[in-house]
Image (cartoon, rainbow, N blue to C red):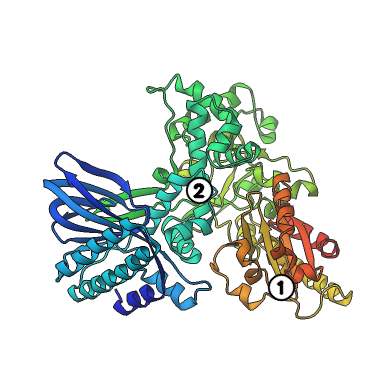
Amino acid sequence: MNVDDHIYLWDHAAIKVLDVRHQVLRMGETLQSYKMPSNGFIFVSRGRAQVQLNQIEYIIQQFQVIHGSKGTILDIFLTEDELEYYLIFYKVTMPIPTSQEIVKLMDRSNPFLLQYSYIPNYPIFIYHKVKLMEQEWRKAGGINRFYVKSLFYQFVHNLLQQLHSQGIDMIKPDLVRQVMMYIQENYAQNLTLESIATHLNYSVPHLSSIFKKKTGYSVIDYVIQTRLDIAANLLVETDATLKEIAENVGYRDPYYLSRLFKKYKGVSPLRFRKQERKDAIHRPQNIIESSIVWRQIWRYIDSDNHYQYQYKGEEDIHMPRGSRTSFTAIALLCITLLLGACAGGTTSSNNEATGQNQPVAESQSANSSETRVYKDSQGAAVEIPTNPERIVLQGNSIGDLLALGIEPVGVDRRFIESGVLEDNGKVSSTDIGFPTNLEKVLTLKPDLIMLSYVMDNEVEEASKIAPTIVFDGMQPLKDRLPIIADIVGKKEEGEQLLNKYNEDVDAMWEQLRADGKVAEGETAVVFQFYWNKAMYVMKTGGVADLLYQPKGFAMDEKVQALQPNSGPYIEITPEVLHETLIGDHLFVVLSADKEAQQAFEELKQEPLWSSLPAVKNNKVHFIEDKWNYDDMTTSNMLLEEFPNMLTK
């Protein structure tokens, strides 16, 4: 705790007193689950009580001062006949523009969010200030409110002096818990990373970084999962229409909710409703087992009044109820398939020559029967086929395998339907769904399963079906393709593909310069716009990876400085367009969704947009978001199309 930092921030903040109240609690009365509407002080003038702030307990008595931040849950239980106390609520804003020094101080040591309780050394002086504040507040005149503000500063000044001289311990609120609680209570509102950060008085980069670090997921992913879990309950427990449910969970477009639901839950909303109600008949309790996301991702521990989250390491947010296939079910299905194969005379071509029936699992070609030991990204040594022939792939690296001449037998087809892979030829791979349907995987008789992310005990269960490799599907193409090529026994082909791609990229940029379409030293910035008006700058991945090739466009220093540096998406707001969309060329990655296009047309009518340098210079280029993948096949296709996109 840095005393000077706290004083500095109080000095630079704009403070507004919102309310001053005088309260009396009598025996038999309690104050329970009261959410503080803003930052505030509690000053006890008489009596004793047990107080909890966010479940942290204090025993308070006469002249006790307690501080809590906005959203803090306050509970008061009397231990004497009466408790008389004052509530002083205030709001803090920082000047705009805010210096980086202040932003860093706020992230490191924000005094307005700290929680503490103590008895000042000179309580009578403070008591008179508080009582006078309350009296002047009730007069409600402008000059009286101004006087209250001056008294409040005197009150805080005296508190800070005594607080630091006594060396009082201060508790910094658990930011992750604050974010989760806020989302749970406001999921139906128009939530953005910016709005959540503003409400909680944190900077966007700090909030985003801490939440990601402690949970492994982005704040917006948590918003989506919370809404989808609420929607799932409404589907089963009510007869509300999809439109009504969408409006209740914060989406205006039921079609968009349906797409999200299918993407994250693996089935359409109506099919989910039908299946869950059917299954409910056979369950001991006729209710849906809620899969509330914050119970699935984190195990919450209360130890010595400190809240901690234990992140289990999953690379995806949520495993819907019923989607985990037990090993017993897999084993039973496996036995059924084997028996069916024997009874039906299903044999390999070699078996047909000898007239012998053997289990399907043994019917492998000579090539795939050769094995080697491979150490995957989790450090597991797995015995895999040297040249696998029946690969099941989980993740969006389908185009990498296709470029290597391999069509997997099973994939999550969402990544085919939303991209351009099928424009390059029909992909017949079976859909294994999301989350991965292991029973479906079993029927495909794979000789290798590749997982680009891990959900729950998926590796263990998938390994019962076939050798299972885990790899990092989020790595950039240049790092990911060699790994995938090595796994499938095509290491040299992978190197050749990358070398050829890099040569073609250099040749394309050289030709664009020779044709006068790109000037030396020109900069570019990538802007992604979604249906709900969420806006992002992209520095890596997909289109950005092609733009920022060594011979491509440069990235302006201000764009380079945008945080976070990890991950492709940096959320921005309309107010900072001129501070973030800095480049000679502006590339807009736009969804084909009609609502997204309509929302973007509205943005284009704003003066903020029309005054952007790239817009005024007619150097704005629009690219459908189906191109925004970085697999090898899509990257090669984009390379062919890009010169045309640049001139549109």
Q: Quadrant of the N terminus?
A: bottom left
**Residue 404, visible in the rendered structure:** no
Instruction: Please give the label number shown on residue 583.
Output: 1
What is the x, y in percent for residue 185? 43, 45
Q: Identity of the amino acid at label 1?
A: Gly
In the image, taking residue 523 as reference, residue 302 lies left or right, namely left
**Mark positioned earlier in the residue sequence (2 or 1):** 2
How many residues crowd around disc 1 within 10 Å: few (fewer than 14), some, or many (20 or more)?
Answer: many
User: In x, y percent, where is residue 130?
Assistant: 24, 63
Residue at 68% over, 62% down = 527
Q: Which residue is mark 2?
A: 223
Q: Position of residue 374 (x, y in %)?
A: 53, 57
- Given contact means CB atoms under 8 Å apart, are the residues at marks 2 and 1 in contact? no
Q: How many marks?
A: 2
Q: In which quadrant is the C terminus drawn?
A: bottom right
In this view, the residue farthest toward the left is: 80
**Left or right of 283: which side holds 476?**
right
Nearer the observer, 443 or 90? 90
Give the spatial CA distance, label 2 vs label 1. Answer: 31 Å
Q: Residue 105, relative to residue 607: is it above or below?
A: below
Residue 623 visible in image = yes
Quick one: which residue is furthest to the right in this view?
Answer: 515
Amino acid, disc 2: Val
Q: Helix, strand, or loop for circle 2?
A: helix
Outermost top residue = 281
Assign a secondary structure to mark 1.
loop
Q: Which residue is pictured at 70% across the width and 45% down the height? A: 595
